[in-house]
Each structure stands twice: as C-alpha cells, then as structure tokens.
Image: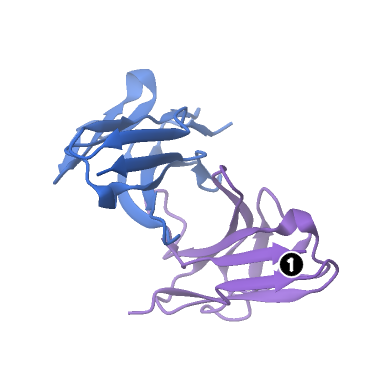
Chain colours: A purple, B blue
C-alpha cells in the first residue's frame, strides 16, 4: 500500500544547480500538492494540481515549476537552486477538492542548498 | 483571510501527565473543516482528525480528545496520560472556501520519561 511516494529522501545541491523532486501516488487521486516546511514553521503551499494538465500557484511558487502529465505523477522542479530553498518538501494528494478531505502526505524530501 | 494560530511553540511534560495543545483559527466562511496532523521525529505527517464547522461535538479516541468551540474559534487537542511516543510536532490546519489548506506553525511536544 504505497500511497504517496517521494524521491529522493535527501539531497544536497550546489547553488545554481537544478533538480527535480519526484512525487507519485497510486490512489488515483485527482488533486496533488507540493509544500515546503521550514524550521519552526508550518507548511506553505508551493503549487497544486486539480488534475492532469492543470496546475496552479500556491503561496510560495517563486523559484519552482511543476507539471502534471499524468494523474499519478506531480514532479517539482528547481531551476536555479538558492540557499533560501533549503527546506523539507512534502507532496500530498486528495481524491478531490472537497473541504473535508484529509491530505495524504509523502514522507518528504530534505533538500540542502550549499 | 484564513489563519491558524498555535501559540504554544514548545511544550514539555513528564510521562503520564495530561497536556492540551491549543489551536485558534480565523475564517469568514461558515462552512469549513479543521484538522490535526502529527509529525513524529521520523518526519512524516500523519492525519489525526477532522471536524466540520457544523459539528461541535467533542471527540475522544483512546487517549486523544478534541474540543471544538465555535464561540472562541478554537479546536484544542488533549492527550491524556501522555507517553514518550506522543513526542512530536502537532499541526492544526483549516480548510475553507476555495483557499488551500492553511497550517499553523505547529507545537513541538516533548514527553519525558
């Protein structure tokens, strides 16, 4: 029962490098989300998607890009890594957009930019 | 605007003590949901409970209980007879209208044996 799977779990990048954080879910959920969690802070929404081919910005989208070519996958791309992007990144999904649907989270990706 | 405030940044208790984690929310919507999530030291986020704005009944699940009071816009979480395994960061979150889920900053609970 995989749920939401994120890879990699840890990564160190140099300033200016690029990388893609992978997220896949096997629950056939339409909605998917990317959050970042900084120390002592709650989660902040970066981007979300309501279905394949549809994405939208969240609260903190600058410096990131996403795509949603399939229902299962929702990768997050960092084009020019900056120290301010050092954070823990969580991917999540819900079946739909209903208010009461709890989000299913992946285990997170810990990213350090040096 | 939607907002969730968890005023307690860190709490430390001795095992078997009861502890209450506070959550105060703001929203102008009349229909909304409140959630609690647990983040243990291993880092994953675990869904604990949800409550909709029309259901003010308190809920108990084992040693966990939740008190929802619309009059004070609060959704507090109590752990009875705390255990070391309860040590975690606990997040309260609000979903209303078309806005994304809004999280509080979390309360770090340390239960000392």
Marker count (numbered): 1
Whole-percent x and y of residue B8? 44, 29
Whole-percent x and y of residue A65? 74, 67
Give the residue furthest to the front.
B113
Q: Quadrant of the C terminus of chain B?
A: top left
Within-10-Å neighbours for mark 1: few <14, some 14–19, many 20+? some
Q: In this view, does A84 lie to the left or right of B60?
A: right
Give A85 or B95, whichever is nearer the viewer. A85
**Residue A102 in sight in this render:** no
From this view, report whether residue B79 is shown above or below residue A48: above
Q: Which chain carries label 1?
A: A
Choose top left, top right, bottom left or bottom right for residue A53.
bottom right
Choose top left, top right, bottom left or bottom right for residue A2.
bottom left
Choose top left, top right, bottom left or bottom right for residue A21.
bottom right
Q: Which residue position holds label 1?
A: A65
Give B75 or A54, whichever is nearer the viewer. B75
Give the residue furthest to the top.
B71
Q: At 67% from the left edge and 48% from the top edge, which residue is drawn? A: A59
Q: In which quarter of the image is the N terminus of chain B?
A: top right
Give B26 or A85, whichever is nearer the viewer. A85
**Residue B75 in sight in this render:** yes
Give the residue furthest to the left.
B62
Q: At 36% from the left edge and 26% from the top edge, which residue is drawn? A: B74
Whole-percent x and y of residue B69? 30, 24
Q: At 69% from the left edge and 76% from the top edge, which residue is drawn? A: A20
- Callout 1: helix, strand or loop? strand
């Amino acid at each position: 029962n995989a749920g939401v799977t994120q890879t990699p779990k840890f990564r160190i990048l140099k300033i200016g490098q690029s990388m893609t954080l992978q997220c896949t879910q096997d629950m056939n959920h339409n909605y998917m989300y990317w959050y970042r969690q900084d120390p002592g802070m709650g989660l902040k929404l970066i981007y979300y998607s309501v279905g394949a081919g549809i994405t939208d910005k969240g609260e903190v989208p600058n410096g990131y890009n996403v795509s949603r070519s399939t229902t299962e996958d929702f990768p997050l791309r960092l084009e020019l890594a900056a120290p301010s992007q050092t954070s823990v990144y969580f991917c999540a999904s819900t079946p739909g957009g209903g208010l009461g649907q709890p989000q299913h989270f992946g285990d997170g990706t810990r990213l350090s930019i040096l | 605007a939607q907002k969730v405030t968890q005023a307690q940044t860190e709490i430390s208790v001795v095992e078997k003590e009861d502890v209450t984690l506070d959550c105060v929310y703001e929203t102008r919507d009349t229909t909304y949901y409140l959630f609690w999530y647990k983040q243990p030291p291993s880092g994953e986020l675990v869904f604990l409970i949800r409550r909709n704005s029309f259901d003010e009944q308190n809920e108990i699940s084992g040693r966990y209980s939740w008190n929802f009071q619309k009059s004070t816009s609060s959704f507090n979480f109590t752990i009875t007879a705390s255990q070391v395994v309860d040590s975690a960061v606990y997040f309260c979150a609000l979903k209303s209208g078309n806005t994304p889920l809004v999280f509080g900053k979390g309360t770090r609970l340390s239960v000392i044996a």
